[in-house]
Amino acid sequence: MLELWSANRRYGLWRRLWLALAEGERSLGVAIPDEALAQMRAHLDDIDYETVARYEKEFRHDVMAHVYAFGEVAPAARPYIHLGATSAYVTDNADLVLMREGLAVLREKVVGALTALAAFARTWRAEPTLGYTHLQPAQLTTVGKRATLWMQDLVLDLVDLDARAASLPLRGVKGTTGTQASFLEIFQGDHAKVRALETHVCRTMGFAHALPVTGQTYSRKIDAQVLGVVAGIATSAAKFSSDIRMLQSFGEMSEPFESGQIGSSAMAYKRNPMRSERIASLARFVASLESNANQTHAVQYFERTLDDSANRRLVIPESFLATDAILILMENVTSGLEVHPARIRHRLMDELPFMVTEQLIVRAVEAGGDRQVIHEIIRRHSVEAATAMKNNGSSNDLLERLAGDKDFPRSVDLSTAADPRRYVGRAPEQVDEFLGEVVDPILSSAAPRRASREAVRV
């Protein structure tokens, strides 16, 4: 991602766009010499930044600085570079190329996180754990089922990402205010040639189509739409990181922790969820950039203003770079998640006896008991057990209390009531179905992953 948003990549795209423009104009009748195109092709990436800086200092215009620097190494092309174009021809079209490529990089990393989570969910598909609503213990779920909730968010993000990437247009060849007047002049009023030139540039840059109409720039709503997808990925990761931080505070799960890692400069025993906290921190930053893009779009008066330029040069790359970092961290965390079943069961058994009381009432009535009497017996023992837990630190002995109550029907089997596996519903099967029907097809259709060059430093 750093390479993608580098100066070499951006300005190399500018030169490729100028070449595509010149080749298209030449094919449609403009007298551009073969040598001019050959010189342009030979110098697409050998950018002399000292020369560019010298021209920019003189002109105070970055695009013209690059036009002149390109002209120095391709002198035969100098009269034709940027012919008919405005600055947005290279700046806007290059940004759209970069955003589409950035989405592809993010997609690969989302798939990486899904791969790690799929393996985790399979391993822990049937491990009972407390479910929570309102941050209060609720019905049981499984560790693997909870992981599918994190995965579902990423799957929804992939749907948005793929749709946005597939529909992303090029700005195209539009001229100063979007009317294509300069190109109509070049082709002596031939509208068909102007349209053909735009088609040529689109195809050369790998796009199926250009925006039908623009001002000087493409609508900045596109930036907001793309950053909406990027921010959506970041917030999915943030939700995941929040759950991990909470579970680590419960002692049920832990993110990876290196043997020599220090959690606190003062408290030597600490194992802080630093990676998950970093995900949350970066995600908050990315989410703020989406609203920034919408605000920029809202104030682009008429055909364009320039208050978008400096802002976009920060917002768009930073959004992609931060989300790339988030996904690197997320895959690292998911690949090394530690589960602590004993702690999970201990916390679960503190709550489970209370959760099964409704079923116990039903069983007791089936055994011939009076529903209201049974309810009062269970209520009284529940209150006493809860009081002992809170005031004395006792374990939850509700079932033992009921077993010792002579008024509770003896025929009700309390020995199986405390088996957590009875209360997870279809959670294990839901894990299998979700992986088999939703996630596995995504993973099997994904392109082979490139070797990662990123290192996680915490």
Image (spheres, grey):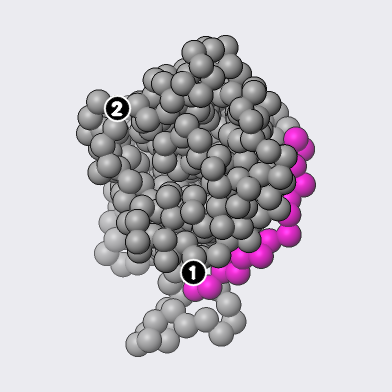
Q: Please name the amino acid that badge 1 sits on.
A: Glu
Residue 457 colored in magenta in the image: yes
Select label 1 or label 2 by which is in front.
Answer: 1
Residue occupying the point 64% across, 22% down: 28
420 or 290: which is nearer to us?
290
Residue occupying the point 64% across, 23% down: 29
Residue at numbered disc 2: 303
Q: Residues within 10 Å of mark 1 (few under 14, many from 20)?
A: few
Q: Is label 1 in contact with label 2 (beta carbons under 8 Å)?
A: no
Percent x, y of residue 328: 57, 58
Q: Is residue 355 left or right of residue 261?
A: left
SS of the residue under disc 2:
loop
Residues drawn in magenta: 443-458
Residue 90 colored in magenta in the image: no
Residue at numbered disc 1: 50
Q: If the image is split into quadrants, where does the N terminus sit?
A: bottom right
161 or 180: which is nearer to us?
180
Q: Please name the amino acid that badge 2 sits on.
A: Glu
